[in-house]
Image: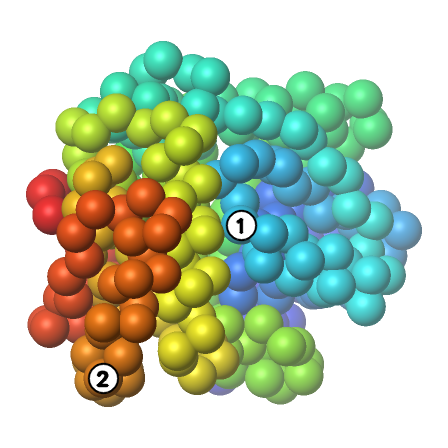
Amino acid sequence: MLEDKLALLKEYIAPLRRAAVAFSGGTDSALLAFVTKEVLQENAFAITIWSPLLSAKDKTDIFDFTETHGIALIRVDFDETRDADFCMNTPERCYFCKASRIKAIEDRARTWDIPWILDGSNVDDLGDFRPGMRALKESACVKSPLLECGFSKAEIREASRLYGLTSADKPAAACLASRVPTGTKIDADIVSVIERGEDILREYLPDNTQLRLRYDGHCGKIETELKAVSLIQARIEEITAKLKNIGVETVSVDEDGYKTGKVTKKI
C-alpha cells in the first residue's frame, strides 16, 4: 500500500520537470524534497524562507539535510515581524504569513526559472484549524503532492523510515509565532525569548520530544508531551530561574501535555 502511494507520488512529480519544494526541514517537506530530488534530479530544489521565526536548530537541520542528499538550497531572506497584518496576531495570522511567504517564494523561484512550488501539506492537515491552507489554494504555482496523493502523517513517517531519513521521527513543528496567544502583538523580542527559552527547555528533555513555550511577553507556559511533564516538574525551580533570566516573568507547566492543533488564546 505504501509502496503504491510512493509510486503514485513519483508519477505525480515526474511531469512537472522542474520544481522547488517549500522546505521547512520538517518531516513532511523533507520526504517531499527527497522524492522530488530522486525523480527530477538536478531540476529539483529546496527553497526556504530564512526568517526570525525559524529557529537556529531548524536552520541547522535544513543545511544538514540538503547537503546530505545533494539538494540545491535556495534561501529567501524574509522578516514577518515587519508585516503589520502578521504582527497584529489575529486568528488570520497564518493566512497573512502564508500568503506573503508564497509570494516571496514565487518571486525567487521565477528568477531560477522554476515553474512549480511543492508544498508539504498532508491529509491530516485538513482536520486542523489552518488559515494558511487558503493561501495555498490562491496560488496557481503551488501544488501539494502529498495531500493530493493521499498521504497521512503516519505514512509520511513510515516512508521516511523506509528511505532512512533522519527526519522520520522529528516532532511536528510550527513557527515560533505560534506560541504567542492570539491577540497579543508579535515582535522580534517576543520571538527571541521563545527561541531562547525552548533552547533552555531542551536541555531537560530527551531528543525529539515535542515542546512549546507559550509566551505573551510576560507569562510563559511550558507544554511538552504528557510523558515528559514530570521531567520538567522535577527541575522546575532551576528552569524557572533560567527563564526569568531571559525575561519570562512567571512560569507554569501545562499538566495536560502538548496537543497538536491547539490554538493559543491565553496563558
Residue at x 35%, y 22% (from the top left corner): 86
Q: In this figure, what is the number of numbered marks?
A: 2
Q: Mark 2 falls on what kind of element?
A: helix
Residue 216 point in image, percent of width and height: 21, 39
In the image, residue 100 sits, relative to residue 151, either above or below, namely above
Query: What label sits on residue 55 in the rendered view?
Result: 1
Query: In the rendered structure, which amino acid carries the disc numbered 2?
Result: Ala
Residue tagged by mark 2? 234
Q: Mark 1 falls on what kind of element?
A: loop
Give the mark nearer the N terminus: 2 vs 1. 1
Query: What label sits on residue 92 in the rendered view?
Result: none
Residue 135 point in image, percent of width and height: 40, 29
In the image, residue 24 sits, relative to residue 223, either above or below, namely above
Colour convention: rainbow
Q: Nearer the viewer, residue 174 or 6?
A: 174
Query: In the rendered structure, which amino acid carries the disc numbered 1?
Result: Ser
Q: Residues within 10 Å of mark 2 (few under 14, many from 20)?
A: few
Q: Nearer the viewer, mark 2 or mark 1?
A: 2
Residue 224: quadrant of the picture: bottom left
